[in-house]
Structure formats: C-alpha cells, structure tokens
Image (cartoon, rainbow, N blue to C red):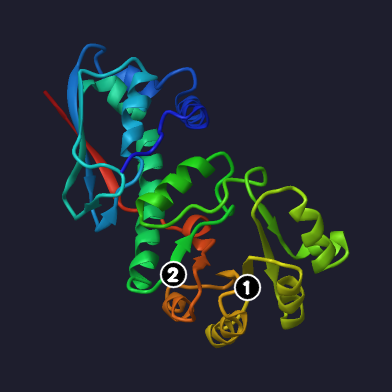
Amino acid sequence: MGFDFLHPEILEAVRRALEEDIGAGDITSMACVPEGRKARGRYLARQPMVVAGVELLPLIYDLRGGVDSLELKLASGDRAGPGQVVAEVCGRARTLLECERTALNFLQRLSGVATLTRRYADAVAGTRCCILDTRKTTPGLRRLEKIAVAAGGGTNHRTGLFDAVLIKNNHIAAAGGVRPALERAFEAGMPVEIEVRTRAELDQALEAGAKHLLLDNLTPEEAAEWIRHIAGRAITEISGGVRLETVRAYAESGADFVSVGALTHSATAVDLNFRLELI
C-alpha cells in the first residue's frame, strides 16, 4: 500500500513539529550527551495496533541532519503486536534524542487512528458497506490522518470543501430549500451529495434528481426503512452518532457507506515507545 508522505503539506507539518519541540536546540542532550556519541534506537509496539506514519521517520531524521542507518520493519497498514519492532535507527545519540518525541507523537497518533479504523472496518466485514472518514480532523494534520484512515482499511471522503459537493442542512437553509440547493449545485457539473434529515427532505431530494444521499441521525431501523424506500435510486451514506457497537447494524441496513467522525476526532493514541542504547 503506497501513500504520499512527501506531499508539501506533510513536509510542512513535520517541519513545524520539529521546530515546535526543538526550537533553538535540545539543551538537555547538549548538556549531558557527548557530541560524537553514537546510539541505536528501536521503536517498539506495546499493544496490538495497526501501524501508520512510520514512513515519516526518514523525513524527520533528514530534517535534523540525517542518521547512519534507518530500517523500517513495518509499513503503514501492517499490524504489530506487543514487543514487535516497528523501526530501528542508528546515528548520533543527540539526533536520536531530539527527534524522539516528534517521531513518537506522529506514530502514536496516526497508528491510533489506523487502529480504530481497522476495528470499524472489521465490524462491517462481509457487508456491502464501506467506512468513510470526515473533515473532523486535527487542524493541519488532515492529510496525515486521512492516510492513517486508509491504512486502517477505511475509505477517504472528500479532502475539504474544495474537491466535492456535499450539501448539508445549513446549505439547504441558506439556499432556500432542498430543490433550489440541488438545482444550483447541479449547475456546477460535479457529482453532488445532499444531507437529508426528514422523510420530506428525502422525497424532495429524490424528486429533484439526487443520486447520492447522506442520511443523518437515524436509528439502524429507520435507516433500513429509508433505504428500502429509496430502492436503489441513489447511493446512500449514513452519518451521525455511529458507534463501534452500532456500526454493524447500520451496515446491515443496506447502506453503501457509513461515515464516522470518531475515526479522527476521538482516536486514542497507541502505546508505542522508543528505546535507546549505546553502540
């Protein structure tokens, strides 16, 4: 599985993270570690996880002058168990120490997103439904967090407001209703998705020619009823209040997609650490 970890947005995010942590220099390492001392460091999983972001390590170290060697034992999307080595690096001890927290912050956060996504993807296995992410991401880290979702088996929704048309309830209010919102959106010549929250809005959207519907804040039973009513006339996506305990029921309603904001806004960082030894 290949991901673009050299995208300019990612390069800038890593550069900012290093500058934020190191600033004018790692004064602790400079004070107590001899300048030329060499060391080996291992990134170790301490719980079952899906790894994401390990490909950032070469970039992190290159931005701080490089290392003697770096071996990525796993790639984004791979599973790791407790005690498993994710990556091994050798170089100046000072370099390894000053990069430690930034590297762990990225790996723990992104692997947390991938691990949670995999739980959702596994929960709907065997159905026709795919798990989608949302725009509920950490500011400045959206591209990385969406990579982590994909590594965990999820599907990326739109990147932002600029690359897909998704008419939500406030757009409907601002446009003056479902039909005028759709009519104006269709003129853009792009695929259009629209959120519907009542049966009246659902029927208005179908009558106006909507082919992609976002069904918001329904119970699994309501979703199944609405999808039977839609009868294949539009692609369906379910959103709002979906939890790991309920996602299977939503998938079995017949929906094509379930979008889950929790993948990125509520993922818990995994337990992954860095162990250093002299060489």
Q: Is residue 138 left or right of residue 201?
A: left
What percent of the width, then of the height, locates residue 86?
Answer: 22, 42
Residue 33 visible in rendering: yes
Q: Nearer the viewer, residue 218 or 184?
A: 184
Q: Across the whole image, how many numbered discs are drawn on residues?
A: 2
Residue in the image at 25% along x and 19% along y: 67
Residue 269 visible in rendering: no
> Is mark 1 in CB contact (under 8 Å) with mark 2?
no
Which secondary structure lies at badge 2?
loop
Q: Mark 1 = which residue?
A: 215
Can you say which quadrant of the picture contains the C terminus? top left
Which secondary structure lies at badge 1?
strand
Q: Nearer the viewer, residue 204 or 117?
A: 204
What percent of the width, then of the height, locates residue 223?
Answer: 57, 81
In the figure, 185 relative to 250: above or below? above
Q: Quadrant of residue 180?
A: bottom right
In the figure, 39 relative to 223: above or below? above
Can you say which quadrant of the picture contains the N terminus? top left
What percent of the width, then of the height, locates residue 87?
Answer: 22, 37
Q: Quadrant of residue 170?
A: bottom right
Compute the Cα span from label 1 to label 2.
14 Å
Q: Mark 2 = which residue?
A: 129
Q: Nearer the viewer, residue 182 or 275?
A: 182
